[in-house]
Image (cartoon, rainbow, N blue to C red):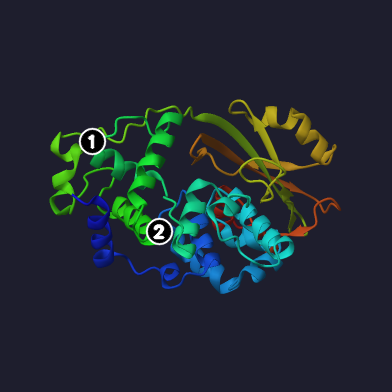
Amino acid sequence: MNFSKHLIDWYLKNKRELPWRQAKDPYCIWLSEIILQQTRIDQGLPYYNKFVAHYPTLNDLAKASEKEILKLWQGLGYYSRARNLHFSAKHIVNELNGVFPNTYKNLLQLKGIGDYTASAIASICFNEETAVVDGNVYRVLARFFGVETAINSSKGIKEFKKLAQELIKGEHPGTFNQAIMEFGARMCIPQNPNCDFCPVKNGCIAFGQNKIETLPNKPKKTVIKQRFFNYLVIETENNCGHLVKRKEGIWKNLYQFPLIETDKVIDEKVLFSHNEFENLFNNISVNIRLHNTTMVVHKLSHQTIFTKFWIVKLKEDKKFVTHWDTLIEYPVPKLIENFLKTYKSK
């Protein structure tokens, strides 16, 4: 069975009409691939459309401020993608004279671009025979060829890349890569794949040996960390609040309320005596109340954040001058965004 040909035939008949598939512009392909990392198409598509509307060219993106880009990205998560996107756009415009790298090797030099994204751009835009390997591709190859090697091992990463590279030879590389990704996303899905209508099921080892549920092999390694956040939501008598810019972590350069992170749940008494609380308010008279009696639970891939929002009322103070009406203009984590949508300052 010619696996590659069957997949391409299926793709050409069944592919979704997506905006970035209408052109070979590397900027559009790059933007779509960065947005769709760790993101479903139905969630990422509105963000892609917003970015293209705001920044129709690479030069437009490079000229934008990071604050503007993070605000537009807000809610999509994994914010390092947006920061790297902006950094690389400026690098291409300022250091490469606006010429987008056109080979897999050169694309890898851009910040935020790894093997998968470089392969996608090089194959789709520049017809280079370099195979993409992502979660969808791992699943399709592991099932069809019966590969038992763990996909999250160094051996597995090399083995699957080699196999995908062999399959792409002699094909239209951009079409093959899009075909196998689309097939994994829509047919050979993680749970209850559509085997009855699969065009390659007769050659599929997992189907023939009843191993659909056990392949691909991905031993669990992730340890979920628990964190406890106490946000200080400041309100002055003249309706001002306070946001601070994060300097590190997954939310780097996003804004948030002053934060006191603890190793366990704390009460008001412990909060008052905390050094960071005392340093922030420096003996200022404040009234404080807990906004949410039920802990807000925010789950990320490798951590779960348990959050309390403490409302801190005080008189007018020169340290806190951000008017509450303008807080919505700042790029903030989803956790803060959800709070701002429901909370009204009084």
Q: Position of residue 305 (x, y in %)?
A: 54, 36
Q: Position of residue 143 (x, y in %)?
A: 25, 40
- Mark sitting on residue 170: none
Q: Position of residue 141 (x, y in %)?
A: 30, 42
- Mark sitting on residue 213: 1
Horizontal side of residue 275 vs 208, given as left or right:
right
What residue type is disc 1 on?
Glu
Q: Secondary structure at mark 1?
A: loop
Which residue in the protein does label 2 denote? 41
**Residue at 29% across / 34% down in the picture?**
147
| Number of on-image labels | 2
Taking depth in this image into account, of 62 and 147 the one nearest to the observer is 147
What residue type is disc 2 on?
Ile
Decide: is 336 above or below 28. Answer: above
Q: Residues within 10 Å of mark 1 (few under 14, many from 20)?
A: some
Image quarter of residue 72: bottom right
**Residue at 43% across / 35% down in the picture?**
158
Instruction: State which quarter of the image contains the C terminus.
Output: bottom right
